[in-house]
Amino acid sequence: MALVPCVTLNDGTSLPAIGFGTYPLTGDDAVAAVESAIGCGYRLLDTAVNYGNEVEVGEGIRRSGIAREELVVTSKLPGRAHGYDEAVASVRDSLARLGLDRIDLHLIHWPNPRVGRYLDAWRALVDLQKDGLIRTVGVSNFTSEHLRVVIDDTGVVPAVNQIELHPHFPQPEMRTEHERLGIQTESWSPLGKRQAPFGAPPVAAAAEHHGVTPGQVILRWQVQLGSVPIPKSATPSRQQENLDVFGFTLSVDEMTAISALARPDGRLFGGDPDTHEEQ
Ligand code: NAP
């Protein structure tokens, strides 16, 4: 089984340096994928209310037979739960669906700034952390401005910001901001939903040089950028492959060449946090 190092968060807890994404898996496929991923060695799992698979993730965890305390289970608050009472109720519903008495990492899924209630949602997560229902509180798709608003109000710095990050969209400004604030970056769609530039010369050359696959090069690039990627795969062999990125190191030149694949229009869909509205 691959040995996965951990990163330390600003609340003193830690996260495995790579995790397992579960969108858009549902039903038996989701249960099987989670059980198999845990069997491969994944200990960080990523779900959300809006993925509609928290029940299946909980079932996969139970079937895996792994000790609960070995896992870091992530879920996310949907847009329709932005508001203090709504957020508390949503987290309690997530716990019931997962069949757990604590969520290890809970994120606000999107800021929905036009609605303007993400601060109330953040205050609720901070209180739920004090109550012990959430271990670590974080956000997703927050810009510098959204981070400033929640930090100024509560004094609590999100431990994690999960953002879109892949070679066509490497997010240098957000990574610098996270470093300044002590926030751990997590990468969603780290393989660009399979549209990452697997065949681009810097990726292909590094894969050849290190005797690994293009997917492994891209995930290793994320790890060396200081981000925690959460690739999804329903295929056990690819789950295994994606976890196995700690036995080689990309050179500075290889890192620079992969980062240079950035495109101004590199986002996968209209996922601009300032305008994207999530229900
Ligand atoms: P992704 O992980 O970048 O890509 C998944 C796709 O790549 C699947 O089609 C998978 O196919 C394929 N794949 C997996 N490993 C591969 C490899 N080694 N080589 C080639 N293809 C490979 O995309 P994602 O699922 O959108 O993102 C990952 C996770 O991020 C999600 O599952 C979700 O948990 C999270 N997410 C969060 C947000 C947010 O707003 N916070 C947004 C999007 C996603 P197979 O399954 O057939 O192997």
Image: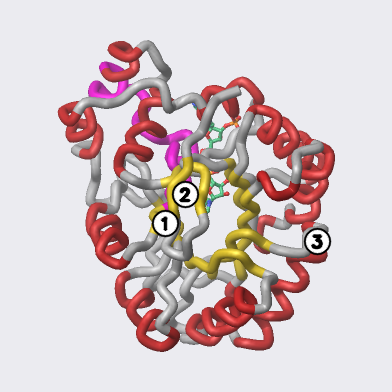
In the image, residue 180 above or below residue 43: below
**Marks 3 and 2, Cα distance to the nearest angstrom?**
23 Å
Please state the horizontal and vertical placement of residue 250, each as a whole percent of the image: 27, 26
Residue at disc 1, secondary structure: strand
Residue 60: quarter of image: top right
The residue that label 3 is drawn on is: 97
In the image, residue 104 above or below residue 87: above
Quadrant into which the N terminus falls: top right
Q: How many numbered marks appear? A: 3
Residue 248: quarter of image: top left
Classify mark 1 as within 8 Å of ligand 1 or not, answering yes or no: yes
Q: Earlier in the sequence, mark 3 or mark 2?
A: 3
* Residue 208 included in the magenta stretch of the image: no
Q: Residue at x 29, y 47 (%)?
A: 170
Q: Which residues are magenta?
A: 186-205
Q: Amino acid at mark 1?
A: Ile
Determine crowd level at label 3: few under 14, some 14-19, many 20+ residues with C-alpha closer than 10 A.
some
Instruction: Tell me if label 1 and label 2 are in contact, CB under 8 Å.
Output: yes
**Marks 1 and 2, Cα distance to the nearest angstrom?**
6 Å
Please state the horizontal and vertical placement of residue 199, each as a whole percent of the image: 34, 22
Residue 23 in view, yes or no: no
Q: Earlier in the sequence, mark 1 or mark 3?
A: 3
Please state the horizontal and vertical placement of residue 137, each as a whole percent of the image: 53, 68
**What label does residue 163 carry, if any?**
1
**Marks 1 and 3, Cα distance to the nearest angstrom?**
25 Å
Residue at disc 3, secondary structure: helix
Classify mark 2 as within 8 Å of ligand 1 or not, answering yes or no: yes
70 left or right, relative to 146: right
Quadrant into which the C terminus falls: bottom right
Coloring basis for residues: secondary structure
Please state the horizontal and vertical placement of residue 131, each as a whole percent of the image: 67, 78
The residue that label 2 is drawn on is: 188
